[in-house]
Amino acid sequence: MALSTTQSIWRSGGGDTTRTAYCGSGLMAAEFYIANAAATGANVVVSSAAGAPDLILPAGAVVVSVAINDAGTGTVNLGTTGYTSGTTAGTLALALSAAAGTTSIGSVVTGTPTTSMAYVTSSDNTSGAGTIGGYLIYFVQDPLTGQQNV
């Protein structure tokens, strides 16, 4: 199977050849792993492998759900730290249960877009323990707000 990487924001007009339909943004999944749910301010990595890279989301990323398949206990907060600034940049999820399951935008997953490229961070909320792993499901905000480009 061939692998491709693009620096584009994926949008689709659903095959509309008249170029009038709204172009929706495609969902993407980013694998994540938290080695210690009790830690505060730690960068989230992409796997449990030794030396795994930090998870970095692009500017305009909007997390719509978090799917956990490697469960810990308690709750954690997921946030972001600016890639170049190193300062706290935003909140992705508050009091996210470390149990297996999927949590979508609502009272836990904020749906707030990243303002710039950012590291994903984890902090203990309530008795976080163990490892947590799964997927962040997100899309990148469309700068053309669904309009067809020419």
Image (cartoon, helix red, strand yellow):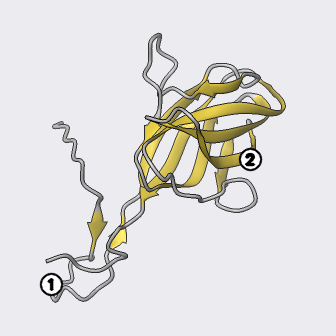
Please provide percent x and percent y for residue 75. Answer: 79, 37
**Residue 70 visible at all:** no
* Residue that appears at 67% across and 52% down: 103
* Secondary element type, mark 1: loop
Name the residue tied to disc 2: 94
**142 shown above or below 86:** below
Please provide percent x and percent y for residue 53. Answer: 43, 22
- Disc 2 or disc 1, which is closer to the eye? 2
Residue 69: name its quadrant: top right
**79 shown above or below 23:** above
In the foreground, 26 or 68: 26
In the foreground, 20 or 103: 20
* Residue that appears at 58% across and 36% down: 87
User: Would you say 123 lies left or right of 2 here?
Assistant: right
* Secondary element type, mark 2: strand
Q: Amino acid at mark 2?
A: Leu
Q: Amino acid at mark 1?
A: Thr
**Residue 8 visible at all:** yes
For the N terminus, the image quarter is top left
Please provide percent x and percent y for residue 37. Answer: 72, 25
**98 shown above or below 60:** above
* Residue that appears at 73% across and 20% down: 130
Name the residue tied to disc 1: 17
